[in-house]
Amino acid sequence: MDIRDILIMIDGSERNAALLAFTCGLAARHDARVIGLRCADPLSPVMMYADPTAGLMVADLLDELMVKARAEAAVMAAGFHERLRLENVLGEWRYIEAAAWDRAPTEARLSDLIVLGQPDGDDRLVEEMLFRSGRPVLVVPRMGEHETPGRHILVGWNDSREAARAVHDAMALLQKAESVTVLTADSAGPDAMPGGDVAAHLARHGVVVSLVQSSDAEADPTDLLLNAAADRGADLIVVGGYGHSRLREMVLGGVTRGLLHHMTVPVLFSH
């Protein structure tokens, strides 16, 4: 599937500016549009703790917060459009007055790829995007300089539904890569090399692919992926995004959370 629409969350920070430049580079490489989404929810904290007897005082405060949020969004929109102009990339600006974790997944459903910065500790937005948007999520580390990824890609393959989904969602990136490595762990099943089939499938799609099988069945999957990425010079990891149920919610599984917290290169998660 071609990449034609890339959605990025905008928060106006210096780090977010670098993330936007990264996204524009990705869009230029794939002839895609960039959708900048700003979600602001200035009223919820006030409404949560407001004294209902305060009346006009609360109403004035709410108006003030709303005006401030809209003014900040206007500044962010100007910066967004200027960056796209400099990068010669087409795009679209969206501003929504709602919590990002609540509304962003819905807004992202008609994009081909979501780009997020590595969270500082609160994984909720990543969780909601991964499990509710139906779109692949590319998370960029907060540390280091990261050029447009996808020249050397590492695919983590474990023959799961999520891994198959990730390979499909990343196909446009894989086809443009100079090299792709499929990493599998040793399997006790009847298929001695479970990544062989996916490597052959990728080759039929024109992907320059090699297969590496780890014999260390006891290795931590997160460490295995990050070490392989370093050894192979990968600038992007592609994996299935795993979760487990907690009552009626989905929360990140161990490998997904491990990569999210310790990533050294961008990671594309797909659920």
Image (cartoon, rainbow, N blue to C red):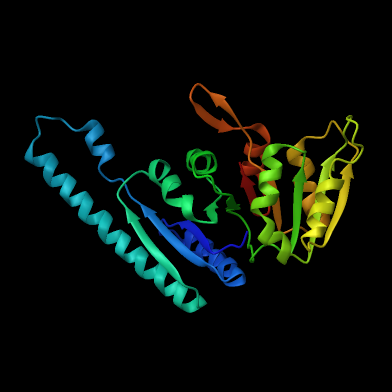
Question: Taking 226 as reference, is 253 left or right?
Answer: left
Task: Indicate the quadrant containing the C terminus: top left, top right, bottom left or bottom right.
Answer: top right
Residue at 78% over, 61% down: 207
Residue 156 position, x and y percent, is 75, 45
Q: Is residue 214 above or below residue 77?
A: above
Tell which residue pokes out farthest to the left in this image: 56
Which one is in front, 36 or 145? 36
Question: Taking 267 as reference, is 186 left or right?
Answer: right
Residue 184 position, x and y percent, is 83, 42
Q: Is residue 51 above or below residue 256?
A: above
Residue at 72% over, 60% down: 174
Residue at 78% over, 67% down: 178
Residue at 61% over, 62% down: 2
Q: Is residue 154 above or below residue 178?
A: above
Task: Indicate the quadrant containing the N terminus: top left, top right, bottom left or bottom right.
Answer: bottom right
| Corner quadrant of residue 217 | top right
Which one is in front, 107 or 201? 201
Tell which residue pokes out farthest to the front in this image: 204
| Corner quadrant of residue 3 | bottom right
